[in-house]
Every structure is written in C-alpha cells, then in structure tokens.
Amino acid sequence: MIRVVVADDHPVVREGLARYLGRDVDLEVIASVGTASGLMAALHLNPDVVLLDMHLPDMAGPDAVRTVRSANTATRVLALSSFAEPELVEAAFQAGVAGYLLKDVDPKVLRDALKVVAAGGEVVPPDIRRIRDEAARLLRQAAVLSPREKEVLDLMGQGLSNADIGRRLFISEKTVKTHVSHILAKFDVADRTGAILEGLRRRLIRVRDNPPTP
C-alpha cells in the first residue's frame, strides 16, 4: 500500500483528490492538508509520496519540496499544479520533485504517476519536458552577456574601478554599476572577483601581464 499525503490549499480540490485516490486499492491517503505547516506536521506519518500543490499560502512550492526532502529523504514528492511557468517547473525539479503534473491531468494518469514515483521513478510528461527545455533556453539566454557587459567585464579583468571603466567607455559610474550588477546576476556570483574568474573560465576575457592605464 502506497501512503500518500495530499497538500493543496483549496479544500474542494484537496478533499476531492483524497476521496478519488482513496478508491484505488494500491493507494492510502493518510492525510490531506492545506498549508506547508500542516504538511510538515504530517511528515511524522512517514508517507511514501506527497502530492504537492506548488502554491501553498505559507511557503513557496520549491521551498516546501526542499523542506520535505530534508525532513524525510525517503518521501518522494509529486508536484500537481495549475501553473507551468518554466522558472517554477525547473525550480521544482531543482528542489527535488520526482515528477510534475498539471491539474488538468487525466485521473488515471495521476494514479499511475503516484505509483511510478513511489517505486522510485520519475514522471515528466511531454508538455513538462518541453517547459523544462524552455527553462533551460531562458537560462542560457540570461547567461549571455551583452556587448557592453563584455566590455565592462574585460575592463574589470584589467583591474579598473567603476569610475575608471566609466571614463574609458564614456558612460556614467552609475551605468557601470548597473552593468556590473547584471554581470554578477548572469554569472550567479557574489562579487567582482567571482565575475572575473567566471569570465576567465568561459574564455570571455584573458589575463594581461601589463594592464593598460585608464
């Protein structure tokens, strides 16, 4: 028997799912909750699978996934959501979901998905796979520096300050700071040193023995 916790903030949806899944001889709904705090309290029941809505009122879906996985690594999570934004879908998988379904899914597909997940498999329907591919494309696009950002990064690598870079490129220091912030965000680094190291790793800049004077 597969022990399932249903977590959804809409009472009608939550109770409907609990009743429907309970008709399957292989599934036992041991709790249905409407909040992340309620979900955490239900984890002491050691469910095999949490059927999780991605928009609980007291915690973002991916954060709830991480909390479940850290509290009980044996419990698998199957996301069931009305939302399919690429960023949300990818964040859910990065957090540790074993599958992602939309709420217009065929009921039998949902039951089968719970069984696949409980057995250690993954559930990634074609529509979700396409969304994940789109998320990867957006991530790659976001990581590409503009020509101006490449110029700023190159001058950062030469050791120039924001003020010096501004004078070299004939732009304000404030504009330089904006470019630097964008570079840090695209490279997912915390500071200028990290950006320079990442620029070297990506071969966007190169080490110069004698940096030019501004």
Image (cartoon, rainbow, N blue to C red):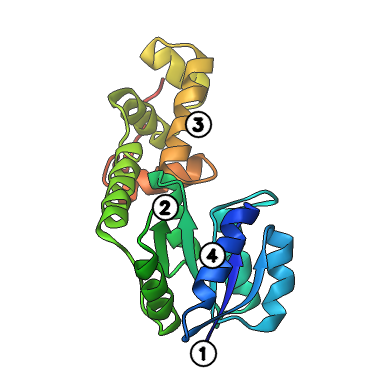
Hey, what amino acid is under mark 3? Ser
Hey, what amino acid is under mark 2? Val
The residue labelled by disc 4 is 17
Label 4 near label 1: C-beta < 8 Å?
no
Residues at marks 1 and 2, CA–CA distance in whole angstroms: 29 Å
The spot of residue 94 in percent (x, y) is 45, 61
Res. 89 mark: 2
Residues at marks 4 and 2, CA–CA distance in whole angstroms: 21 Å
Badge 1 or badge 4: first in the primary sequence: 1
Corner quadrant of residue 166:
top left
Residues at marks 3 and 1, CA–CA distance in whole angstroms: 52 Å
Label 4: state its secondary structure. Answer: helix
Badge 3 or badge 2: first in the primary sequence: 2
Res. 109 in view: yes
Q: Residue at x 53, y 16 (%)?
A: 174
Hey, what amino acid is under mark 1? Met
Label 3 near label 4: C-beta < 8 Å?
no
Q: Residues within 10 Å of mark 3 (few under 14, many from 20)?
A: some
The residue labelled by disc 3 is 181
Label 2 near label 4: C-beta < 8 Å?
no
Q: Residue at x 36, y 28 (%)?
A: 149
Badge 4 or badge 2: first in the primary sequence: 4
Residues at marks 1 and 4, CA–CA distance in whole angstroms: 17 Å
Label 1: state its secondary structure. Answer: loop
Badge 3 or badge 1: first in the primary sequence: 1
